[in-house]
Amino acid sequence: MRWSGNVTGHQRDHLVATARATLFPVCWDEPGGTAVIESLALGTPVVGYRRGCLPELIEPGTGSLADFGDEAALARLIARCRRA
C-alpha cells in the first residue's frame, strides 16, 4: 500500500486500474458509492465494510466485504486480492 496524493484524469485511471484493490473502509452508511463504481468500471476489486451501498454494488468476483469494524478481516481480504 502507498499514498499517491491527489491525482486526476488519466493518471488517476491508470493508478486505480493497476491497483491490487481499492479499499473503502467507510464508517458511515455511504448512499452513493461513485468512487466504488469507478473502481469497478476500471476492473479493480473493491474491499470494504458491509454497510451502506457496498453490499448492493459488490457482487461475487468484484470484491470482498467484511463486517464493520473488523480491520483484521479487511487486511486478510486485501491480501487475497489478485490481479488478472
Image: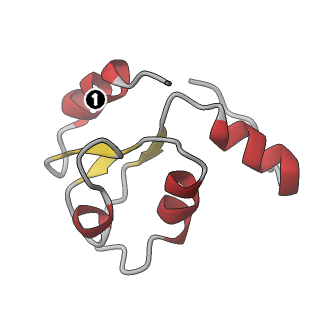
Mark 1 crowd level (few <14, some 14–19, many ≥20, 10 Å Cα):
some
Q: Is residue 34 above or below residue 63?
A: below
Left or right relative to 37: residue 16: right
Question: Seen from this angle, which residue lies furthest left?
Answer: 67
Tell me the element at label 1.
Answer: helix
* Residue occupied by mark 1: 77
Q: Position of residue 35 (x, y in %)?
A: 55, 63
Q: Position of residue 71 (x, y in %)?
A: 25, 35
Q: Is residue 30 above or below residue 13?
A: below
Left or right relative to 78: residue 22: right
Count numbered badges in the picture: 1
Q: Amino acid at mark 1?
A: Leu
Which residue is rendered at x = 38% and y = 25% of the image? 81
* Residue 5 visible in rendering: no
* Residue 11 visible in rendering: yes
Q: How is the image coloured?
A: secondary structure
Residue 64 falls in image quadrant? top left
Q: Position of residue 57 (x, y in %)?
A: 33, 65
Q: Position of residue 65 (x, y in %)?
A: 23, 46
Which residue is rendered at x = 45% and y = 43% of the image? 23
Image quadrant occupied by the N terminus: top right
Which residue is rendered at x = 49% and y = 54% of the image? 40
Q: Is residue 51 above or below residue 24?
A: below
Question: Seen from this angle, which residue lies furthest front?
Answer: 84
Which residue is rendered at x = 49% and y = 24% of the image? 84
Viewer-proximal residue among 50 and 38: 38
